[in-house]
Image (cartoon, grey):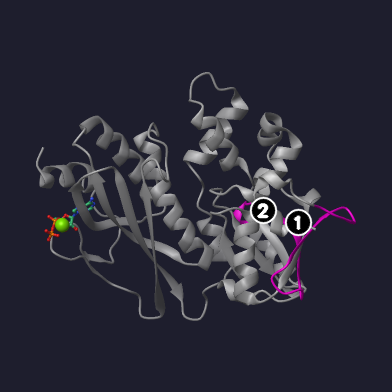
Amino acid sequence: MKEFDLIERFFERRGRQRKDVIVGIGDDCAILKVPDNKRLAITTDTLVENVHFLAHTPPRSVAYKAVAVNLSDLAAMGAEPAWISLSITLPDTDEAWLESFSEGLYELLEYYSVDLIGGDTVKGPLSLTITAQGFIPENCEIRRSGAKPGDWIYVSGTLGDAGAGLEIAKQGLENLNESQDYLVNRHFSPTPRVMLGNALRRVASSCIDVSDGTLADLQHILERSDVGARVHIGRLPLSDELVDVVGIDDAVNHALTSGDDYELLFTVSEEQRGQLETILGNCDVQATCIGQITGQKQKIDLRLGDMPFSLPKDAGFEHFSG
Ligand code: ADP
Ligand code: MG
């Protein structure tokens, strides 16, 4: 199959959803219309086979996740997604693979009314780079640098599921029970928290999406904001499925240290807490307060009840303990 036929068949087949795409796929550049009163938010993520996803990952999931992680970055700053471009390196033109990949891609694009506006297609070891662009009203972006001592720390959804799902997926995808299947799905198909991120503009003082792990990503907020944090282990939102499959101790370890959940971790001042409750009701998203920002610069103080809590050494995050 020729490159142009491939692009037309798998990356251009659904037509356009958006009026702000003046020129889309098929010319040398895409030409786009940015609303006058908004700012453009741009983010890029690359996924390489055997590095960012397992070799036997279903193609539908490869595409879905690549889009999801980019939309999650937009969400974490409060941006509303508009367009993506896709650079893909393919080892061959396996039509069944591309068909399934294209399905996964368009599933999220159609759900969020995002258009694929261009890209590049080359031959080589499987990898893909997506650039996503979105809009934010002027001065409304939620940065990592805005957390203040006394702010409350929240996370959306549940933590640790994707990390446990990855471990299960590494063992193979056959004969999984319901809980294992749920966790694997959380790994393959993370939910970008787009509605929540948009609603948190003017309410959250800082925000990040959990890609590296809760503690690692919280640490990014602490560094940028020059503050510390107290986190209550007993308040971490854990799914029943996670506790069912790995037990409570490993569930806590996963929740704190394994990545890829793509939940939003954000801070809210005492004054904005009422507003947050309203937002959570409207977005129909669960978010849990797991602790509070402190003045102890860049230090994470883990607590179990009133006692200091240390992660097991093999969790790989000893420097956060006590
Ligand atoms: P050029 O040689 O000018 O870079 P290409 O032959 O690479 O053009 O691509 C032709 C058109 O197809 C361009 O509009 C490009 O943006 C689009 N395109 C190429 N690969 C992809 C892809 N994977 N997804 C979406 N659009 C693509
Ligand atoms: Mg090209």
Residue topped by disc 2: 317
Given contact means CB atoms under 8 Å apart, are the residues at marks 1 and 2 in contact?
Answer: yes
Residue 178, horizontal then vertical, whole percent? 60, 25
Residue at the far right in the pictured view? 306
- Residue stretch rendered in magenta on the structure: 281-309
Q: Residues within 10 Å of mark 1 (few under 14, many from 20)?
A: some
Q: Is residue 212 left or right of residue 47?
A: right
| Nearest the eye: 261 or 203 | 261
* Residue in front for this viewpoint, 149 or 23: 149
- Residue 209 in sight in this render: yes
Q: Is residue 204 visible?
A: no
Q: Is ligand 1 less than 8 Å from the beta carbon at label 1? A: no
For mark 1, give the secondary structure.
loop
Q: Say the numbered circle drawn on residue 321.
A: 1
At a point 68% along the width and 65% down the height, the residue shown is 276
Q: Quadrant of the C terminus?
A: bottom right
* Residue 206 at x, y percent in the picture: 61, 70
**Label 2 element class:** loop
* Residue at x 30% of width, y 60% of height: 18
In the displayed structure image, the side of residue 292 where residue 189 appears, left or right: left
Report whether 289 appears left or right of 158: right
Quadrant housing residue 319: bottom right
Q: Quadrant of residue 97?
A: top left
The quarter of the rendering in which ligand 1 is drawn is bottom left
Residue at image point 57% right, 33% down: 182
Give the number of the disc on residue 128. none
